[in-house]
């Protein structure tokens, strides 16, 4: 059965109070159960789509990504690009499921014609419901009997000149075999400011020691936060120093460049690009992204944050992201209590990441370890903000702590080490581990936004 609770026609989205909505829903559900007693059992089916991985054919901006339609928050929404048909949004339920009901809460940009479809593999789709005269509001499709892992709403005709926009898509039913399988926890090792021009024959040389520690931890992969090689990051220096230590696990490393990588007289990032090759340029640019488990990792080049191409790419990348947790890393920190201090070059990127509900940012540049409480781009403490870590103790000469910033919770200078980051499907934590193998600092356990 299909119910539509919108006013028809309408030129603007209805403004309803929570009390009115709840009262209307209760009256509708009561009427349904009286008229269709066979649906009484199905009414008890839970929402199985909330917080699950979502993707879409397009998003108007990163602030209107597909995950917004599955976050349980009626104030957020997914919006497609404007003026194009068809468009779709889909959710991965995480396991095979039996779907009994789908509720769609449209924004003003609604679909006049659309299909609700289900699939076992995300390729072959079976139609569950079909609308040819939609007028927005809330569409409640009940009495469904679909089976599959993926569900999508496929819009074929817009009801306005804009795009398609949904505040919420709620899929009700039961997951076959209980809860969806977890993609598993994994560990990452990260550091910045690594290879000084010294070797293991020099007892004061630190990067051989941090490399040995990193290799002993044996993570899923490694991240570098720039200034991988000093001083001018020439290819000859990469081969003479970095390659002898951190190069042992180059094929498991996802690097980003620092300012020292730009000093190579052969050209911007010439040595860096020559040494890492496609590892550093997997998408043909000095910035890229990749996924692991329920996490989306974004590697950025903070030397070119003033270039529109990278900013546009970042917005598009976040809009296309279907993972629930987001971590980004680059060289120059927005906030730091070290010698370089705060670097405003990173603020526009923080604004974009914050708008996309990113969780974690990793930086280098200042040669110390520091962790911050979650905060917004303006430096205001916020439980829903981004957690920043400065991890510039990979081997370069330490910098002293000079001006302690608000929200800075822990600072260590003088003890070389690496970040040992532990990720799960729904959260993260980390330890700063010294070259003696001992934990120097342990973070709280954070839950993804």
Image (spheres, rainbow, N blue to C red):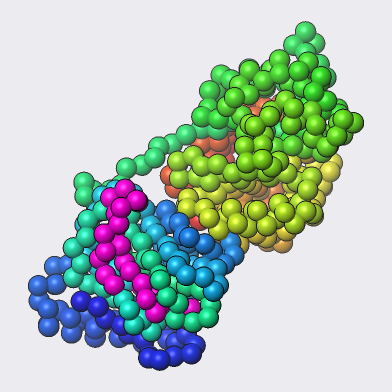
Residue shown at 44% from the left, 87% from the top: 14
Image coordinates for residue 269, horizontal then vertical, percent: 79, 35
Image coordinates for residue 84, horizontal then vertical, percent: 51, 70
Q: Nearer the viewer, residue 4 or 51?
A: 4
Q: Quadrant of residue 116?
A: bottom left
**In the rendered view, would you say 195 is above or below 165?**
above
Image coordinates for residue 416, horizontal then vertical, percent: 71, 26
Task: Check the picture and name the quadrant holding the N terminus.
Answer: bottom left
Image coordinates for residue 50, horizontal then vertical, percent: 37, 60
Q: Nearer the viewer, residue 310 or 374?
A: 310
Residue shown at 26% from the left, 81% from the top: 3
Q: Is residue 344 visible?
A: yes
- Left or right: residue 156 versus residue 131 is right
Q: Nearer the viewer, residue 135 or 259?
A: 135
Residue shown at 32% from the left, 71% from the top: 103
Q: Is residue 15 visible?
A: no
- Left or right: residue 16 versus residue 35 is right
Asked if the magenta segment contains residue 116, the reply would be yes
Asked if the magenta segment contains residue 247, the reply would be no
Q: Nearer the viewer, residue 98 or 294?
A: 98
Magenta stretch, residue numbers = 104-130
- Left or right: residue 25 versus residue 432 is left
Residue shown at 45% from the left, 77% from the top: 158
**In the rendered view, would you say 209 is above or below 11?**
above
Q: Quadrant of residue 411?
A: top right
**In the rendered view, would you say 83 is above or below 52?**
below
- Left or right: residue 269 versus residue 49 is right
Q: Quadrant of residue 381?
A: bottom right
């Amino acid at each position: 059965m299909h119910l539509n609770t919108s006013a028809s026609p309408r030129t603007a989205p209805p403004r309803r109070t929570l009390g009115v909505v709840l009262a209307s829903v209760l009256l509708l559900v009561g009427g349904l159960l009286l008229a269709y007693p066979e649906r009484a059992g199905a009414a008890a089916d839970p929402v199985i789509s909330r917080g699950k991985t979502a993707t879409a054919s397009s998003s108007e901006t990163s602030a209107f990504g597909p995950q917004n339609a599955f976050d349980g928050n009626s104030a957020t929404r997914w919006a497609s690009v404007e003026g194009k048909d068809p468009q779709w949004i889909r959710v991965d339920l995480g396991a095979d499921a039996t779907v009994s009901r789908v509720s769609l809460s449209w924004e003003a940009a609604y679909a006049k014609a659309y299909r609700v479809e289900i699939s076992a593999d995300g390729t072959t789709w079976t139609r569950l419901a079909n609308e040819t005269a939609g007028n927005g509001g809330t569409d409640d499709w009940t009495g469904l009997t679909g089976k599959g892992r993926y569900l999508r709403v496929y819009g074929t005709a817009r009801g306005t000149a804009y795009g398609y926009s949904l505040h919420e898509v709620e899929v009700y039913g039961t997951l076959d075999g209980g809860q969806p399988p977890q993609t598993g926890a994994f560990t990452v090792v990260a550091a910045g400011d690594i290879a000084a021009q010294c070797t293991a024959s020099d007892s004061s040389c630190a990067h051989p020691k941090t490399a040995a520690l990193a290799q002993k931890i044996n993570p899923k992969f490694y991240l570098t936060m720039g200034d991988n090689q000093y001083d001018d990051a020439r290819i000859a220096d990469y081969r003479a120093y970095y390659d002898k230590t951190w190069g042992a696990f180059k094929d498991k490393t996802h690097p980003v460049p620092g300012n020292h990588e730009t000093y190579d007289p052969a050209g911007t990032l010439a040595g860096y690009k020559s040494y890492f090759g496609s590892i550093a340029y997997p998408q043909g640019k000095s910035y890229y992204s990749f996924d692991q488990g329920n996490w989306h990792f974004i590697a950025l080049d903070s030397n070119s944050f003033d270039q529109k191409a990278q900013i546009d790419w970042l917005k598009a990348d976040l809009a296309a992201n279907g993972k629930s947790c987001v971590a980004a890393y680059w060289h120059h920190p927005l906030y730091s209590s070290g010698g370089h201090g705060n670097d405003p070059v990173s603020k526009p990127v923080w604004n974009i990441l914050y708008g996309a509900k990113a969780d974690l940012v990793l930086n280098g540049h200042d040669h110390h370890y520091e962790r911050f409480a979650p905060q917004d781009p303006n430096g205001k403490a916020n439980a829903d903000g981004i957690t920043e870590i400065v991890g510039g103790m990979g081997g370069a000469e330490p910098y002293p702590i000079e001006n302690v910033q608000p929200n800075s919770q822990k600072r260590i200078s003088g003890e070389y080490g690496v970040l040992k980051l532990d990720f799960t499907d729904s959260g993260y934590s980390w330890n700063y581990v010294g070259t003696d193998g001992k934990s120097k600092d342990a973070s709280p356990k954070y839950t993804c936004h």
